[in-house]
Each structure stands twice: as structure tokens, then as C-alpha cells.
Image: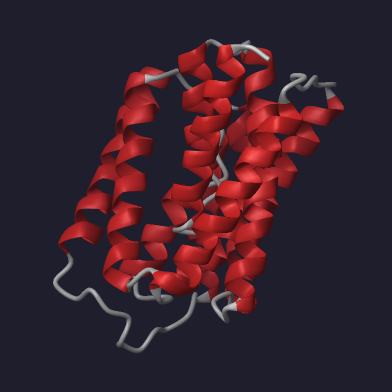
Amino acid sequence: MTPEVVVLAVLFFAAALLYSSVGHAGASAYLAAMAFVGVAPATMRPTALVLNLLVATIVIVRFWRAGHLPWRNLVPLAIGSVPMAFLGGSIDLPGEIYRPLVAVVLLAGAWRLATATTMTDDVERSGVPVLAGVAAGAVIGLLAGLTGTGGGIFLTPLLVLAAWTGTRDAAGLSGAFILVNSIAGLAGLLTGGVSLPPAIPLWMASVVTGGLIGSWLGAARFSIISLRRALAFVLVLAAAKLVFLP
């Protein structure tokens, strides 16, 4: 077992703990960690998607059992996102064009979440409107395909800031949204044949442990203000990854 394998196991655990607390699975963090350590590019994406599937599944179960997964709100989002995520993955858009633009969007969402005057969920939520949900899902799916993520970093702040769901419901929905997109992405990769590194069992155990702890904190322990600020921090990390790492 090399030092790089151990370092990645620790980084993956920390990423899964932080991201799962806000309903995310951590794909952007896994990719950033592997790029930093020097993992072969051919194995980075399938590895990140496998880890993403595990953590997203844990998030779904944890938030659903806590009563924070309104399934009916997922349908319009998924209808719009799946085909556009496939399209986004097939577009070879220069990184110098889309990366700064997406980073600005993420930073704006982080600032809005961290500085909101109302830090509770004690207001009426409208639910996800069908047409707006399909449109939002399509845009987010396209961004997910372009960036190689599950799309949760874009969906969660939208759900909260548009007052479509409460913060914890947004986290639960994002986990389900990420799972759908990650399955589609991994299925596409499998058609071309992929290989996973020998250390994948250790890394899977790391993210499962981190995901169990983080999702427990997010679903039942964190206050709404803590959850929103954790989400803002995650968005800042994702923006930094887009700008500074491949």
C-alpha cells in the first residue's frame, strides 16, 4: 500500500463526510484529490463515479428515513437532467470558457446562502413547479455533463434560494438527483470499457464511513444555519476546483 493510496483514503473520507452532510456525494472533491496526487486520468472519472454512487445511496437512505426526501419533486428535475447530462458529456467545450463562468455562479450561490437574512426554514415552500423543474433540470444536467459531476452543487442552492424546498429537503433531493446522473454517467463509461485501481475497496470503505457520519449530521444534527454555511463552503471548494485544478 503506497503513501498516495493512504493519503487519498483520508482525503476521500473527509470529502464524503463534508459533502454528504449537505446532500452531495463529493465527485468534484474526489476528482480534485486524485488530480492533486497524480492518479492516471483514465481511472479518475470511473473511480469518482463509483464513490459517488455509494455516498449518494447513503445520503438518500439517511435523508429519506429522516423524512427529508419529497420524491414527487425529483421527477421534473430528472426528466430534464438525464438527456442533457448525456449531451453535456459529449460536448468538448474549452475549459477556459465554461470553468470561470460556472465558478462565478457557484460563488454567487455560496455568498447568497452564507449571508441570507433568514436562516430558518419556517416559511411556506412551493415545491418544484413542473415546467420550471424540467427547465432547471435540463440546465443543471448540461452543467453536470460539462463538469463531470452529479449536479448537486448546482441543484441544492437553487432549491433553497428559490424557496422550492427547505434546506434538508434540498439535501435529500440532491442526493437522489446525483444518484440518477451518476448511474447514467457510469453506464456510459462502461460501454467503452473502464478499469478501476486496485485500491478501490479501501477507498470505498473510506467514503462509506465518511458518508454515514456526514449524512447523519446533516439529516438530524446540524442546525439550518450550520447546514447552509456548510453548503456555502462546499460551493466555494467546487468553484476553486474548477478554476485551479484540471
Residue 151 percent location from the top left of the image: 52, 47
**In this view, 114 is above or below 190:** below
From the viewer's perspective, is 233 left or right of 18?
Answer: left
| Quadrant assignment for the C terminus | top left
From the viewer's perspective, is 201 left or right of 26?
Answer: right
Q: Residue at x 73, y 28 (%)?
A: 200
**In this view, 145 is above or below 34:** below
Total numbered labels placed on residues in the image: 0
Residue 149 percent location from the top left of the image: 55, 38
Between 142 and 60, the residue placed more toward the observer is: 60
Splitting the image into 4 quarters, where does residue 67 fall? bottom right
Splitting the image into 4 quarters, where does residue 102 fall? top left
| Quadrant assignment for the N terminus | top right
Residue 218 in view: yes
Residue 125 percent location from the top left of the image: 39, 84
**In this view, 55 is above or below 9:** below
Q: Residue at x 18, y 66 (%)?
A: 116
Splitting the image into 4 quarters, where does residue 115 fall? bottom left
The image's colouring method is: secondary structure
Residue 199 percent location from the top left of the image: 72, 23
Q: Residue at x 36, y 68 (%)?
A: 160
Residue 83 in view: no
From the viewer's perspective, is 47 left or right of 38?
Answer: right
Between 136 and 172, the residue placed more toward the observer is: 172
